[in-house]
Image (tube, coloured by chain):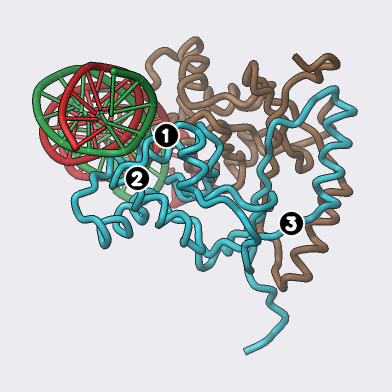
Chain colours: A brown, B cyan, C red, D green
Amino acid sequence: MKHPVRKTLTERCKRKGLRITAPRRVILQVLETAQDHPDVDELHSRVREIEPGVNIATVYRTMNTLAEHGLIERHSFSDGRARYEAVPESHHDHFINVDTGEVIEFRSDEIERIQEEIARTYGFDIVSHRLDIYVRPRQPDDD
Amino acid sequence: MKHPVRKTLTERCKRKGLRITAPRRVILQVLETAQDHPDVDELHSRVREIEPGVNIATVYRTMNTLAEHGLIERHSFSDGRARYEAVPESHHDHFINVDTGEVIEFRSDEIERIQEEIARTYGFDIVSHRLDIYVRPRQPDDD
DNA sequence: TTTGCAAGTGCAATTCATTTGCATCTGCGC
DNA sequence: GCGCAGATGCAAATGAATTGCACTTGCAAA
């Protein structure tokens, strides 16, 4: 899945008036290239491979700042820690493989549509939502 | 909303071989009568109104035990703490009013069906899922 | 009914993720 | 280059949840 022309996270940070410091530059790069949904510990170690001095508190603070500015999404799957991803091109939901912890993205316009519909009948506007489906690989012969 | 004939939580605990102790009896009663989705602190204070000696660690442990036995559902909305409800008659999802924190239950068979369908196309069996929709009351230009 | 003992409890201490106070540093606008 | 608000490093603090340990207690078996 290729990203079309799009501003980098760094550019979008600048536009928001955030200072691009050395730790932040590295954190942004790590986020940008991540293909998964790393937690803070994982981000921190990836960052330290590039820039060893960065403190984990800085990673925490940066994730909060970025989330507040809508540049990343914070997820909390059922493993205690928060996990992050750069805000995606388009919204998607997640399968979580309960055996491996692996996260797989998917999207269903139909589900999105029905959600809108139901919310409307309840008199609500949707602010955001999350749909996490915990799954395991299909087992033909259930033992 | 009335519950049809149904085993009480206490009965279901006994059936699972769990001992019905004094603290547990009260916790189960509180869970059974709760109309909302209390967190551990809230449960603890409701329990202590009836049985002041009960320790919060007991509430935590009991919630874990009950969840492991499938007698309650653990939710984690975006407020840090885990919140619980007795396993409902039938599965439902949640609206969370972002202004008030209020939780409203709803159910859509259509969404359930589409989830199954999508999971199948990905080769997964669904173990469980959660759909939380964060909403605010629809604002035309009232008031 | 009494008894044995594993399950459950109270309490305090611990763990784990996350936040924060504070002194220092540094982008970046001037 | 200067100044300073914003950012960082570090260590200590927080808050939810768990756990070790000694003590209790349901409840099955006798």
Horizontal arrangement in the rendering, residue B88 relative to residue A54 (left or right) = right
In x, y percent, where is residue B10? 45, 47
Inter-mark Cα distance, 2 to 1: 10 Å
* Mark 2 / mark 1, whichever is N-terminal: 1
- Amino acid type, callout 1: Leu
Secondary structure state at the residue bearing disc 2: helix
Along the line of sight, the residue nearer the viewer: C25 or A31: A31
Determine which residue is flagged by label 2.
B24
Image point 66% across, 55% down: which residue? B133
- Give residue B75's position: percent from left, percent from top: 53, 45
Residue A75 vs B98, above or below: the answer is above
Residue B18 has which mark?
Answer: 1
Residue corresponding to mark 3: B107
Q: Chain of mark 2?
A: B
Q: Earlier in the sequence, mark 2 or mark 3?
A: 2
Q: Identify whether A35 is placed above or below A62.
A: above
Can you tell which quarter of the image residue A8 is in? Answer: top right
Query: In which image quadrant can residue A33 be found?
Result: top right
Check disc 2: other Cα within 10 Å, few if <14, some if 14-19, many if 20+.
many
Does the rendering let one see residue A20? no
Mark 2 and mark 3: Cα distance apart in space: 30 Å
Q: Quadrant of the C terminus of chain A?
A: top right
Which of the two discs, 2 and 3, sits closer to the camera?
2
Q: Picture quarter containing residue B138?
A: bottom right
Mark toward the viewer: 1 or 3: 1
Q: Residue at x 64, y 72 (%)?
A: B137
* Residue type marked 3: Arg
Q: For the residue marked with disc 2, what is the amino acid?
A: Arg
Host chain of mark 3? B
